Image (tube, helix red, strand yellow):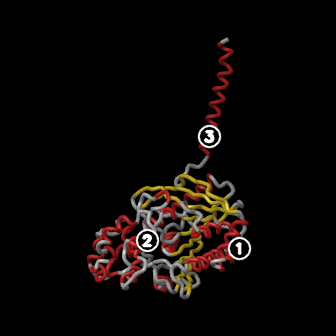
Amino acid sequence: MKEKGAIPRLAVLSAAFILFITSCTKNDDKPENTWLESSEYVSLYTTASVNNMIDLASTQSPGISTLKQYVRSGVEVYKISYKTKAGDEDITASGLVCVPVTGGEYPVISFQNGTNTLNSQAPSNNPMNSSYVLVETLASMGFIVVIPDYPGFGTSSNVAHPYLVASPTVISVTDMFRAVQELDETELDEITVKNEYYLLGYSQGGWATLSLHKAMELEYQDDFNLAGSACGAGPYDINLLFSNMINVTSYPMPVYLGYIYNAYSSYKQFSNPVTDIFSEPYASRIASLYDGSKSFEQINSQLSTSIASLLNPDFVSGYASSDRYLPVRNAFKANSIQPWHTYKPLMLIHGGGDTQVNPVTTETMYTAMLQAGTSSTDCTKIILPGLDHSDGIIPAMLEGIKFIINLKESR
């Protein structure tokens, strides 16, 4: 009796063992991710809803309606988290990935957003923000759209944001590209990432885009095939930007000045104490203003638009030449974008009436790129007459989107 009872029990154990081995083998066949940590489905835009959103946006900015001709499919939006670095620290960063509903192989557009101080407004925390929705819908036009949060936002809100600090910005975005490739391999069965990358950004995002353009062309060329970039109103020369900010009686956005100091201090770009640059009571406030909980308006209200009141008088008079401020000048130079001979299509766009980021930054960069050997057919410039910084966002981005679509269709 015992022997007869042992046979079915042995069969059950054997079957369980085979099932265990099979399941292990299936898991082993699945690629192990190096960068991608998690993905989360966020939303679906049907083709009809994409067209409706474009129609709605066109009531405020009529030029947006020209994008309807390129709409081909609906869009799926995902939030991902991935491994990267912020300075010397290993972190988990996050962002949005938008893909066409229709399967196929698609090139990538990476959108680098402009200055943000609120974690609640980071792309992955607020994907329905009107600033991001228009970019998300570009996936309906035959692209995989990547929108990084940047370190300091989303899942990495516990670290300082590297505002206008080049290395952690570039590394965090290119690591997101690698994570998206792994998302393609493990989660997006019918979507393939084409090794063809386009970059788009405005303000801080314009600077980040040009920083990425240079790095992808000269350092990451074996990893990513850069196809072209459109950069709007970026502070490409940070020394020039800072000089323009402080050599005026009144500057409307002191939030930027404090943000730069907070980031450069946090990422050890220079060691000057805050009182070297800011006057009291503002110097003591800087450290508490950039924790992701305060808006532009709230931060500006804690600072001063009067340069004479906001900044240490020694800094204003000695910034350009004093040895005391040499580390600051060197840090700004190191994180500025030095001109080079680019062979990749590049468009620089700026509002001619910009009072926050002086259009001279774009004029100077364009001239310097040509002097470095870049062809005027590879690098083009558009100055939008009379437009201030906020007014220029949509017109500049439309110019950039059309530039990228034309590049894609000409390949």
Q: Which residue is mark 2?
A: 164
In the drawing, what numbered circle is on residue 184? none
Q: Which residue is mark 3?
A: 25
Which residue corresponds to the image point at 57% horizontal and 70% vertical from the top-left? 131
Query: How far apart in space, not on screen, are marks 2 and 1 (Cα)?
Result: 34 Å
In the drawing, what numbered circle is on residue 68? 1
State the image coordinates of residue 207 (x, y, percent, origin top left): 48, 74
The vertical placement of 59 against 2, above or below, is below
Q: In the rendered structure, which amino acid carries the disc numbered 1? A: Lys
In this picture, residue 334 sits left or right of residue 127: left
Earlier in the chain: of badge 3 and badge 1, it is: 3
Check contact, mark 3 vs mark 1: CB within 8 A: no
State the image coordinates of residue 351 (x, y, percent, origin top left): 53, 83
Check contact, mark 2 vs mark 1: CB within 8 A: no
Q: In the rendered structure, which amino acid carries the disc numbered 2? A: Leu
Report the quarter where the C terminus lies.
bottom right
Nearer the observer: mark 2 or 3; the answer is 2
Which residue corresponds to the image point at 56% horizontal and 69% vertical from the top-left? 111
Q: In the rendered structure, which amino acid carries the disc numbered 3? A: Thr
Which residue corresponds to the image point at 65% horizontal and 62% vertical from the top-left? 99
Earlier in the chain: of badge 2 and badge 1, it is: 1
Which residue corresponds to the image point at 66% horizontal and 26% vertical from the top-left? 12
Query: How far apart in space, not on screen, are marks 2 and 3 (Cα)?
Result: 46 Å
